[in-house]
């Protein structure tokens, strides 16, 4: 009977192995699926003259490597941070560098009109051209500033959209932790639950940089890189955003009874990418555009105030540009006419000394955030150049992050992914094992029948 028992145990083990391979093949295209296998162990002999008691399935194996999973999640965070920023940078590059809509185009057009007016400062068409060019320049500033405002709104909306997704994922991870701990304690196979949890962690890692720690009960604790807890066992935190006194969005984390303030950039992932773009690119550019517009408008108004209009009678020049208001960053004063341009220094007809002072405004300095002091005429070019460098650096880092992510996924798949050729070999191997043990049972049965025949 020991022969039959041995062969029966081996047949059952072969069936378990074939079942694991069939599950692997069935999930060949399932994202995040981790292949399984059986660990076979010999059953020891029960007596001195016993060869053994067959084979048993000691464990159902799950082929996974925690280090490779961690690397894949870290790469997802880096890729998410860089990929989230690049579309904004690309759009700004196109707008700031456009030959028609850029700030430089508006400023150059205004000063070209001033130079043209120098031919005949009393010419009404040339003077009107200056007013028209001034209005066009203001529209250029307002257009660029509106693009920046729209991008800021988009950043805030994207951040607001990511947070509910992240909170749902955190709740799912906590729920899966609880199911895995309970199922593992009862001896059930939890591989599919672990796969679902790993997929959730991978998705969360794209949103923010994580640290993941395995616990003895099978659960996984998830924290931010900066240490704040996101998931501990079956407890999950909640992320939220609010506006501070300056109107900027700030992130916070509520975990149980504790509340944590989060750094918009240090959180990493897509959220960190949005925070970095907003803090280090978008807001400095907004401040720079406003600084150029305000400085240029104030300098032009100052020079005009020192001159005389064409008259009659000649009077001190009124301001051309109105103070900034909610309707726009820059605008000409309502009702300003060509006759109000104070091109003359003393009111003499044809005098253009004050016009020459207006032309020199282009060479005055303005101080920009992150750039420093530059000439007004060069300010937009300096901004566009710095933006281009930032965009190129981000593209290079995005390329690197994408390569690292692809390599990390490939490394994970080399351990955990299903290889149909390997599974085909396994199926054939265990099929042969099953057939061989069926043959053993057949031989044992023949021997048993022969023994009974001898006793008749």
Image (spheres, grey):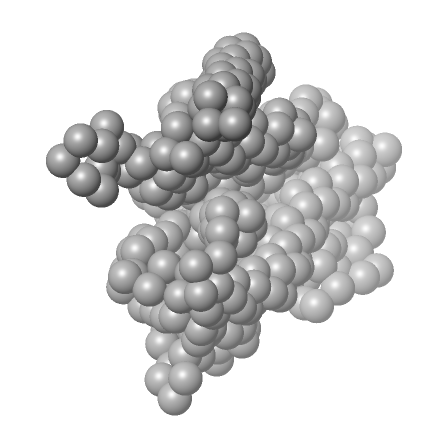
Q: For the image shown, how many numbered marks are present on the structure?
A: 0
| Residue furthest front as drawn | 456
Question: Is residue 37 positioned above or below 425 on the image?
Answer: below
Residue shown at the point (23%, 38%) measured from the top left: 44
Residue at position x 80%, y 35% in the image: 129
Where residue 3 sits: x, y (%)?
39, 28
Q: Name the one closer to the observer, 143 or 193.
A: 193
> In the picture shown, does residue 296 fall above or below 126?
below
Q: Residue at x 76, y 40 (%)?
A: 136
How far from the left and from the top, in percent, is residue 154? 66, 53
Q: In terms of depth relative to the viewer, which is nearer, 138 or 176? A: 176
| Residue 153 location, quadrant | bottom right
Is 233 displayed left or right of 296 in the figure? left
Q: Residue at x 36, y 59 (%)?
A: 218
**Residue 441 seen in render:** no
Q: Position of residue 161 (x, y in %)?
A: 65, 60
Image-quadrant location for residue 421: top right
Foreground: 70 or 240? 70
Locate residue 62, reporting x and y percent.
Answer: 42, 39
Viewer can see residue 103: yes
């Amino acid at each position: 009977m020991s022969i039959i028992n041995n062969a029966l145990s081996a047949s059952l083990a072969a069936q378990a192995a074939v079942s694991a391979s069939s599950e692997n093949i069935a999930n060949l295209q399932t994202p995040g699926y981790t292949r399984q296998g059986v660990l076979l162990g010999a059953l020891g002999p029960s007596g001195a003259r016993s060869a053994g008691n067959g084979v048993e399935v000691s464990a159902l194996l799950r082929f996974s490597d925690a280090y490779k999973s961690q690397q894949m999640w870290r790469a997802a965070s880096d890729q998410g941070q860089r990929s989230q920023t690049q579309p904004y940078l690309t759009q700004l590059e196109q707008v700031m560098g456009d030959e028609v809509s850029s700030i430089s185009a508006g400023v150059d057009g205004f000063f070209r009109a001033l130079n043209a007016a120098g031919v005949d400062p009393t010419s009404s068409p040339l003077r009107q051209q200056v007013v028209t060019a001034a209005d066009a320049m203001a529209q250029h500033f307002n257009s660029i500033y509106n693009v920046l405002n729209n991008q800021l709104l988009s950043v805030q909306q994207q951040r607001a959209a990511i947070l509910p997704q992240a909170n749902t994922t955190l709740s799912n991870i906590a729920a899966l932790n609880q199911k895995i701990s309970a199922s593992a304690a009862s001896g059930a196979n939890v591989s599919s639950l672990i796969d679902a949890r790993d997929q959730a962690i991978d998705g969360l890692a794209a949103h923010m940089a994580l640290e993941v720690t395995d616990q003895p009960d099978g659960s996984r604790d998830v924290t931010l890189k900066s240490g704040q807890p996101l998931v501990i066992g079956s407890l999950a935190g909640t992320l939220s955003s609010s506006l501070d006194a300056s109107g900027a969005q700030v992130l916070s984390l509520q975990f149980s009874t504790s509340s944590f303030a989060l750094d918009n950039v240090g959180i990493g992932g897509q959220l960190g990418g949005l925070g970095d773009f907003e803090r280090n690119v978008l807001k400095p550019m907004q401040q720079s555009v406003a600084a150029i517009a305000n400085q240029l408008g104030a300098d032009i108004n100052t020079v005009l105030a020192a001159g005389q209009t064409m008259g009659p009678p000649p009077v001190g020049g009124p301001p051309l540009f109105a103070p900034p208001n909610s309707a726009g960053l820059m605008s000409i004063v309502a009702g300003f006419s060509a006759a109000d341009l104070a091109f003359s220094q003393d009111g003499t007809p044809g005098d253009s000394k004050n016009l020459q002072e207006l032309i020199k405004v282009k060479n005055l300095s303005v101080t920009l955030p992150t750039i420093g002091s530059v000439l007004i005429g060069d300010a937009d070019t300096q901004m566009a150049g710095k933006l281009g460098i930032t965009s190129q650096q981000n593209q290079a880092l995005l390329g690197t992050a994408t390569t690292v992510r692809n390599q990390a996924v490939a490394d994970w798949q080399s351990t955990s992914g299903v290889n149909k050729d390997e599974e085909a070999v396994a199926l054939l191997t265990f099929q042969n094992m099953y057939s061989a043990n069926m043959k053993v049972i057949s031989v044992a049965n023949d021997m048993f029948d022969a023994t009974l025949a001898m006793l008749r």
